[in-house]
Amino acid sequence: ITGAVSSAMTVLLVMPGPPLMAYFMSQRHSADAVRALSLTFFSLCYAALTLRHHLVHGFDGDAQFIIASMAPVVIAGTLAGMALVPRFTDGGFRLTVLALLMLSGSGAILSALLS
């Protein structure tokens, strides 16, 4: 069920994170394993989606500018996360991920309701 929901959300909403992370956290994997699995999954998803979008629609100059301007923020966030994670216990990591999932899920619902 989790795999089907994750696939549907990835394809329809380009939102693979919440179902996948909820599944990983329910399996009691270590923080390192969850990070490795999620980073690999997200990297492959976003590479495939970017390639598909490029082949079907292309990227105009505005989109390329936005992508280029956001890349440093993504890289900085990834590096900050890598620096912070060793400070968490597995339990602290689990609580942080669940809090972020609740925030992002609430934000997605609110955004859908307001638009």
Image (cartoon, rainbow, N blue to C red):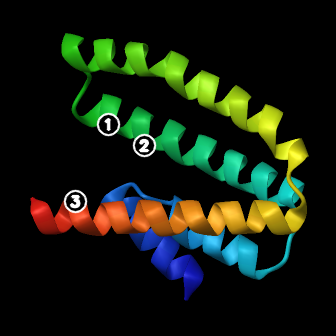
Q: Which residue is mark 1?
A: 53
Task: Locate residue 49, reporting x and y percent.
Answer: 42, 43
Cβ atoms at labels 3 and 2 below 8 Å apart = no
Residue at coordinates 71% horizontally, 68% vertically from top-left?
Answer: 95
Circle 1: element type: helix
Q: Which residue is mark 2?
A: 49
Type of residue at label 1? Answer: His
Circle 2: element type: helix
Q: Nearer the viewer, residue 78 or 96?
A: 96
Task: Locate residue 7, reporting x and y percent.
Answer: 48, 69
Type of residue at label 3? Answer: Ser
Q: Residues within 10 Å of mark 2 (few under 14, many from 20)?
A: some
Image disc number at residue 111: 3
**Precedes in sequence: disc 3 or disc 1:** 1
Task: Locate residue 21, reporting x and y percent.
Answer: 64, 66
Q: Relative to residue 41, is residue 48 drawn left or right?
A: left
Residue 79 in which image quadrant: top right
Q: Relative to residue 67, is residue 111 drawn left or right?
A: left
Q: Residues within 10 Å of mark 3 (few under 14, many from 20)?
A: few
